Amino acid sequence: MVMANRLRVNKQFRREIVGALGARGKRILPSETPKPIQRMFHPNSQRGQMKGYPYYQMFHELSKLPAERVFRFVNMNQLKEEILKQPGVAKLVVEHPELKQGLDQAIREGVRERGIKGAKFWKRAPKSYIDDILAAASPFAKDGSKRMPTIYNAKVGEVISSKLSGPVRERTILDIGTFSGSTIGAVVDKLSAEQKQKLKLILVDVAGKVVKENAVVDLVKLGIPRKNIKVIPASFYSAAVAFKEMKRPLHEYKEKLFLDEFRKLAGKVDFVTAGAATINFATDLNPYLRSINKLLKPGGSFVNWDWGSAESMRPTVRPAALKKVPIGFTESGQKISHFDAYTSFMNFWFRNTLKYPESVTNKFIQDMNSSRKFNSFEWLKKNATWAESEREKTKQMQAQGLLPKLTAEGKPISYERVSGPLPYRNRAYRTPSSMSRAAATHGFEVERTMFPGAEPGKLNTGNNTWLMIMNKK
């Protein structure tokens, strides 16, 4: 009886903590989270779509950072104070003071649930956003012609095809975050007709409809028999729930998680593939990696390409140290510094996403170079008005014909301010060192890490985009 009561109290405590963090119900985080707690995780999310521009866009939901780094950005002591003020939590702690001993762990688990909920934006993403991704990333263009895969997807294809050399036999690949099918499509395209006939594909993605209407159709065109393709329309966290690596997220109550489908695959998968920050949508790598390990056969491989920079490690960095420490090396052995990755990453957001002119990136790097300590959050807050004036100045010059309106490839050059809050940005970027440490902890041996598109010293996103081959021990 005592044990049953303790379990009931602990279960209620979890519900109250997760509720205080806005992750228990179906409403979006900003509307479900108490305002003082919401401000800790997303300071600008309650200021309206454009009032916080541009740092509304850049300083996104902090619970979507890697779980191991969240409390470098969010003050745990202040968060505990606010959570203990919530009526349901306060009442339970008064009645059961021993609960305070597990408060830190309960909050960490609650933050993880908040991150999972925050990352599940694909279910409500507008069609226009999905169409843009499909137009850029699908294996086939609208006219039916086959596209060249990105250098990263092509490299995954090369890795898998090399591992499939030898006698042809039945193989199973599970692809995480399939969406348009760009990564798994590049893999399939490298295989022989005979290999394709004996290949079974498991495609996992919360956007199951997108997968069925696009990726599946393209994979059949590439030669995979339709009967050999299975779609699991669920988050890969469902695999972790299936294998009891984590509890079911409370906001998924009554949702189908396809637990039996994952359990039946245990120990039957030859390769797991993932690309384009799919794994980085996982705020907590631990249940992900443990689940991948359980799915793979002995000696099976997990091949993942992703990106990350020191921007997500801590708010304040030391530029001199970033220049000294390598994030990785090119195929020819050149050092890629954390500084290369950091500045390339920020340049991507300034130029490609926020549509700022080159002058903004130049000032950012100049100020970073002259700083002993540097905080990108504070820099953007301080320089936001100036950056907007640079945008307007550049737009006027373009309108006067003093700057080109098209790229060399004929694509329009726009300096227009983005029209919304970019709710689809994910922040859980990881460096290869953090991935390899986690992989080693959970039964993998890192075979190789590559930076296929890196150009040290240049503002190239290849400097923070890496590919890793991990083999189950």
Image: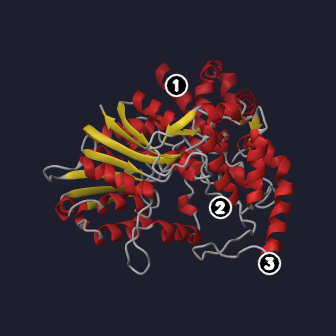
Look at the image and tell me whether residue 246 can be seen: no
Residue position for label 2 = 352
Residue position for label 3 = 399
Residue 154 in the image, given as x and y percentages of width and height: 38, 57
Query: Tag 2: Cα neighbours inside 10 Å, few (<14), some, or many (≥20)?
Result: some
Which mark identifies residue 248? none
Dot 1: element? helix
| Residue at image point 64% right, 55% down | 348
Closest to the observer, 457 or 32: 457
Q: Nearer the viewer, mark 3 or mark 1?
A: 3
Residue 459 in the image, given as x and y percentages of width and height: 62, 52
| Residue at image point 30% right, 72% down | 221
Residue 312 in the image, given as x and y percentages of width and height: 63, 40
The amino acid type of the residue labelled 3 equals Ala
In this rendering, the answer to whether 246 lies above or below 117 is above
The amino acid type of the residue labelled 1 equals Asn
Residue position for label 1 = 5
Nearest to N terminus: mark 1 or mark 2: 1
CA–CA distance between discs 1 and 2? 55 Å
Q: Nearer the viewer, mark 1 or mark 2?
A: 2
Is the Cβ of the residue at disc 3 closer than 8 Å to that at disc 1?
Answer: no
The amino acid type of the residue labelled 2 equals Asn
